[in-house]
């Protein structure tokens, strides 16, 4: 009789749920200040363009940190980096609620952005290494969906809290959420194997130069930046557009319109199947065109019956294009995949940094309608980029999505 103890099977469903949740709340920090711009204008007596730096400061720090901390996770382990990032967010986030001067809010948002940037490169690498091939599409789809849903969930969260409590409480409560999430990820997911590379700390940064020598790869980053310029620019514009005399919506009503965009994002987990069936470039094209048309129609919508479905079309297009772009970059990068994806994240959040700055400038100078049209034009112009991308073999899904 064999009395050997059978090994406990990995709890992939639980791990997926924890990684989805933590990805959602970490990236939500980027977007939670968008509904607070007008609050910051009143509280700190700053202009609308200055208030937008509450979001852009986080984004710039997040973008730079994504390049730096991807290499650290190779050296110290994916789980340790996720724990460190959540730990720093737990400590730094509540301090934002205590500030009385706008410059200190910006400083703390930079610190928060650096802490948050430890998480996405680590969680993506963890998912690719710890999940078997047949489960990898699912986990990457959930993580991609969490990153996209964060753009709406972060705004819904802060809008809800500020209506019932105060802007300070947005950060106090979020600090508690981060602490609970820190416990979840510490005890709830398996420990990964630390690679301990022989290269020095700066080697991953040095490899970035190599991606610009890869045929067709560098121009993909044009799409990386324009996707998030449009996404964050849209959310930075929609609140004041809906509260303008044309619509005159209350904060609660605007909250529901923002929430409707989540519907379009549920396409993201199915993107792997679409890429397999139709090809990565075709899915990317379709997503960009859908997002551009949807955003363009938002700009001419003068009633909610048209604005809500067109905003859903826009978010669905973004949700279709982003995972396809991830697959395309992974395919083109080959052995430089890790560096190429880190730089992709860097360009995404450079776009996220520029989105509020561009949109607020356009609102002040041109109005809401032209702002949406300019952002839509950027997306539609970026549909030209895939024409210049050549895949040497038949279009296949990148190994990261297999």
Image (spheres, rainbow, N blue to C red):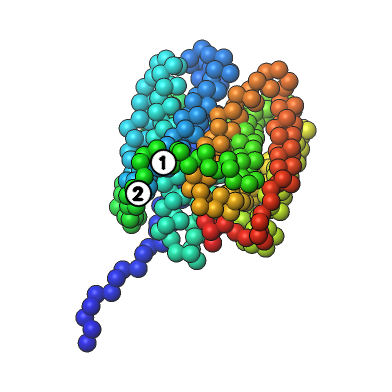
| Viewer-nearest residue: 216 or 179 | 216
Q: Which mark, by number, is residue 6?
A: none
The residue shown at (45%, 16%) is 102
The residue shown at (74%, 31%) is 373
The residue shown at (23%, 78%) is 4
In the image: residue 294, left or right of residue 258: right
Farthest residue toward the top?
Answer: 45
Tell me residue 165's x, y (percent): 44, 28
Q: Which mark, by number, is residue 203?
A: 1
In the image: residue 187, left or right of residue 235: left
Q: Earlier in the sequence, mark 1 or mark 2?
A: 2
The residue shown at (51%, 50%) is 337
In the image: residue 366, left or right of residue 167: right
Tell me residue 19's x, y (percent): 42, 51
In the image: residue 324, left or right of residue 185: right
Quadrant for the N terminus in the image: bottom left
Packing grade of label 2 (10 A; few <14, some 14-19, many >=20) is few
Q: Which residue is mark 2?
A: 197
Marks 1 and 2 in Cβ contact (< 8 Å) = yes
Tell me residue 388's x, y (percent): 72, 45
The answer to which image quadrant residue 254 occupies is top right
Quadrant for the C terminus in the image: bottom right
Indicate whether 216 appears above or below 274.
Answer: above
Indicate whether 271 appears above or below 199.
Answer: below
Residue 178 visible to an observer of this rendering: no
Tell me residue 210's x, y (percent): 53, 42
| Viewer-nearest residue: 83 or 281 | 281
- Label 1 – label 2 distance at C-alpha: 10 Å
Q: Secondary structure at mark 1?
A: helix
């Amino acid at each position: 009789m064999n009395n050997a103890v059978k090994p406990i099977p990995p709890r992939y469903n639980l791990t997926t749920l924890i990684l989805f949740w933590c990805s959602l709340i970490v990236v939500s920090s980027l977007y939670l200040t968008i509904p607070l711009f007008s609050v910051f204008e009143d509280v700190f007596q700053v202009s609308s363009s200055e208030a937008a730096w509450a979001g852009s400061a986080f984004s710039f720090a997040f973008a730079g940190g994504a390049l730096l901390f991807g290499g650290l996770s190779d050296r110290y382990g994916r789980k340790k980096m996720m724990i460190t990032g959540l730990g720093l967010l737990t400590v730094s986030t509540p301090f934002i609620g205590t500030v009385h001067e706008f410059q200190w809010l910006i400083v703390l948002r930079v610190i928060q952005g650096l802490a948050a940037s430890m998480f996405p490169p680590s969680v993506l690498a963890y998912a690719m290494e710890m999940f078997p091939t047949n489960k990898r599409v699912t986990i990457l789809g959930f993580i991609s969906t969490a990153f996209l849903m964060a753009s709406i969930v972060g705004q819904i969260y802060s809008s809800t809290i500020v209506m019932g409590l105060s802007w300070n409480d947005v950060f106090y409560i979020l600090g508690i959420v981060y602490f609970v999430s820190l416990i979840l990820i510490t005890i709830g997911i398996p420990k990964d194997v630390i690679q301990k590379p022989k290269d020095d700390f700066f080697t991953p940064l040095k490899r970035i130069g190599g991606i610009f020598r890869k045929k067709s790869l560098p121009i993909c980053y044009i799409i990386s930046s324009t996707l998030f310029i449009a996404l964050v620019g849209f959310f930075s514009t929609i609140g004041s557009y809906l509260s303008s005399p044309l619509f005159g919506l209350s904060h609660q009503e605007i909250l529901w319109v923002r929430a409707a965009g989540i519907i379009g994002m549920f396409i993201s987990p199915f993107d792997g199947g679409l890429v397999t069936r139709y090809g990565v470039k075709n899915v990317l094209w379709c997503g960009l065109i859908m997002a551009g048309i949807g955003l363009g129609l938002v700009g001419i919508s003068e009633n909610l019956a048209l604005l809500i479905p067109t905003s859903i079309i826009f978010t669905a297009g973004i949700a279709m294009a982003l995972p396809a772009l991830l697959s395309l970059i992974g395919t083109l990068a080959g052995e430089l995949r890790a560096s190429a994806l880190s730089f992709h994240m860097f360009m995404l959040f450079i776009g996220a940094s520029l989105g509020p700055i561009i949109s607020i400038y356009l609102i002040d100078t041109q109005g809401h309608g032209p702002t949406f049209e300019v952002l839509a034009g950027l997306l539609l112009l970026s549909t030209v980029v895939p024409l210049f991308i050549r895949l040497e073999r038949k279009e296949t899904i990148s190994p990261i999505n297999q």
